[in-house]
Amino acid sequence: MKRLFLTCSLLLSLLAISGCASSLSGDSYSREEAQRPISFREATIIGVRKVRLQGTDSNIGLGAGAVIGGVAGSGVGSGRGAIVGAVVGAVVGGVAGAAAEEGITRADAWELTLRMGNGENLVVVQEIGKTDSFAVGDAVRVMQSNGKTRVAPAPKP
């Protein structure tokens, strides 16, 4: 019973940590960006394509999965059987945890091809936000802050 409780606790911890991944959408700002000036340039969208952002590979899923698998596997048999079960469980759990982390944090994104006001072309990839809607010909703002670039619809005149 104690092993089951520990296993469930570790699994819930993995899910909670994975859910804390920051958003990469155009309508999300980091706390460090609040109340700081952000420069922007105006542009026109000349291409829109839906793409996928790969999930994270932070080794949190690997580690949590290995621990959960090891604890679960150690309950198989006794003596050497429990040791072998723990090792096999840790390996299988680690692989499964890493795959789960990548899958949970994978996201749909926009690849936006932009023509800047000076004629320069630029491509920006950003996670699709809840209110994002981009089309060829749209006027947008290209905002840059802390080494990050995001695209947002330009205000309507």
Image (tube, rainbow, N blue to C red):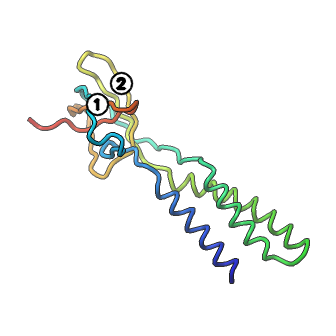
Work out which quarter of the rendered image holds the N terminus and state it.
Answer: bottom right
Work out which quarter of the rendered image holds the C terminus and state it.
Answer: top left
Viewer-proximal residue among 142 and 4? 4
Q: Residues within 10 Å of mark 2 (few under 14, many from 20)?
A: some
Q: Quadrant of residue 82?
A: bottom right
Q: Residues within 10 Å of mark 1 (few under 14, many from 20)?
A: many
Q: Residue at x 88, y 73 (%)?
A: 81
Assign a secondary structure to mark 2: strand
Q: Which residue lies most toward the left here?
A: 157
Q: Percent from the top left, x then y, of residue 145?
A: 34, 32
Label 1 and label 2: CA atoms lie apart by 10 Å
Q: Residue at x 26, y 44 (%)?
A: 133
Q: Which mark is residue 57?
A: none
Q: Residue at x 29, y 28 (%)?
A: 46
Q: Which mark is residue 122?
A: 2
Q: Amino acid at mark 2?
A: Leu
Q: Amino acid at mark 1?
A: Val
**Mark 1 vs mark 2: which is more N-terminal?**
2
Report whether 48 appears left or right of 17. Answer: left
Q: Percent from the top left, x then y, of residue 63?
A: 67, 56
Viewer-proximal residue among 121 and 86? 86
The number of discs equals: 2
Query: Is mark 1 in CB contact (under 8 Å) with mark 2?
Result: yes
Q: Relative to residue 157, is residue 101 depicted above or below? A: below
Q: Percent from the top left, x then y, of residue 75?
A: 78, 76
Q: Residue at x 87, y 78 (%)?
A: 78
Q: Which residue lies most toward the right here?
A: 80
To which residue does mark 1 refer?
Answer: 142
Q: Percent from the top left, x then y, of residue 148?
A: 39, 33
